[in-house]
Structures are given as C-alpha cells and as structure tokens.
Amino acid sequence: MKYGIAIFPSKKVQDEANSYRKRYDPHYALIPPHITVKEPFETDEQVLESTIIPELKRIAKSTTSFSIKISKVSSFSPVTNTIYLKVDPSDEIVKLNQNLHEGIIPDNKEYSFVPHITIAQKLSDEEFSDVYGSLSMDSFDIVDKVDRFQLLYQLENGAWSVYETFRFGEQ
C-alpha cells in the first residue's frame, strides 16, 4: 500500500488555500491542503505496524511544536506548472523532514525539500502564466502553529486518508 506523511495546517490556512485550490487544483477532492514532509512510499501493513509506526512515534515525541510562516506564492516552473503557498523553511520543519528520511523509514527522497502548500497544478502554460502572474502580486501574512503530523494512506480512487496522527512531544 502507498503511504505518505504530511502536516495539515489549521482550518484558517486550509480555507485560504482552498479558495484557490477549488479553481486551480484537480486534486482538490483527493486530499485537504497540506505540507508533504515525506513523499509517498510503498510498504506492507506488517512492516508499517512493527517498525515504521514505532519510529514515527519516536520522531514525534522528540519534536516540539513550531510555527510556520507563509508570506507569498511561488512555483516549481519550469519543471511543472505548480503554484504553491511558500512555507518559510524553518530549522524545525527541515529537521522534521530529515528525521523522516533517516533510520528505518524508507529514504525515497526524489527532490530537495521545499515546504509548501499546493494551490494550483496541472495548468496549461497560458493558464499558469495568468494565474501565477496575478497571485505573485499578492502578499500573505500567515503564521500557523504546528503540533502534529499525519501518516496517510492512499485509497484505490487516488484519495488520501489519515491512518494515524502523531502529536509532537507525545508517545
């Protein structure tokens, strides 16, 4: 089965992201706005339960709550026509990402970690240019507290669902 690890921001941040996603993100119905802290990986449930979940509990216990800051949009252009709310890469979120790629958890990192919340993807070049041009003039002043991450699993229809939530500082 395919699993991933993400942080779901507060409802306020999700509402802001969704105001764009419902128009520009075809994955809008598959997963709420999130920050991917570990790219999807394949494993079986036995390995998940016996080794990965205990490791996630350990990582969560050793992580303290932190704040994220979003001040602008950015994009992955020219690689893809994806537009996102840029999460400033704090030491805490970078360390969490590193911890989730070390030890017994599969290290499947394909790209450098860029903390973000996708708000538009799979746009045509013309649509991307229009939307990004408009959104890049907007500024955001969003600060949100993060105190947990979620282990997700992918359903047959491509949607993602929460398997377990791990609160920082708890076991």
Image: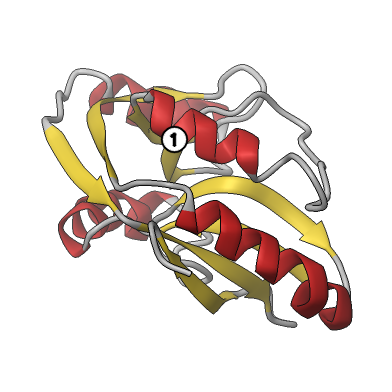
- How is this picture coloured? secondary structure
Q: Which residue in the structure is indicated by mark 1? A: 93
Q: Nearer the viewer, residue 43 or 22?
A: 43
Q: How many marks?
A: 1
Q: What's the residue at 75%, 82% (across, down)?
A: 156
Q: Position of residue 116 (x, y in %)?
A: 43, 36
Q: Position of residue 95 (x, y in %)?
A: 52, 32
Q: Is residue 113 left or right of residue 156?
A: left
Q: Is residue 118 left or right of residue 42?
A: left
Q: Residue furthest left?
A: 141
> Which element is circle 1 on?
helix
Q: Quadrant of the N terminus?
A: bottom right
- Residue type beneath disc 1: Ile
Q: What's the residue at 68%, 70% (across, down)?
A: 53
| Depicted 53 relative to depicted 111: above or below | below
Q: Position of residue 164 (x, y in %)?
A: 54, 77
Residue 1 visible? The answer is no
Query: Would you identify the image quadrant in which residue 142 lies?
Result: top left
Q: Nearer the viewer, residue 37 or 25?
A: 37
Q: Nearer the viewer, residue 56 or 33?
A: 56
Residue 17 visible? The answer is yes
| 10 Å crowding of disc 1: few (<14), some (14-19), many (20+) | many
Q: Is residue 77 left or right of residue 21?
A: right
Query: Would you identify the image quadrant in which residue 50 lies?
Result: bottom right
| Depicted 123 relative to depicted 13: above or below | above
Q: Position of residue 40 (x, y in %)?
A: 72, 55
Query: Would you identify the image quadrant in which residue 76 lies?
Result: top right
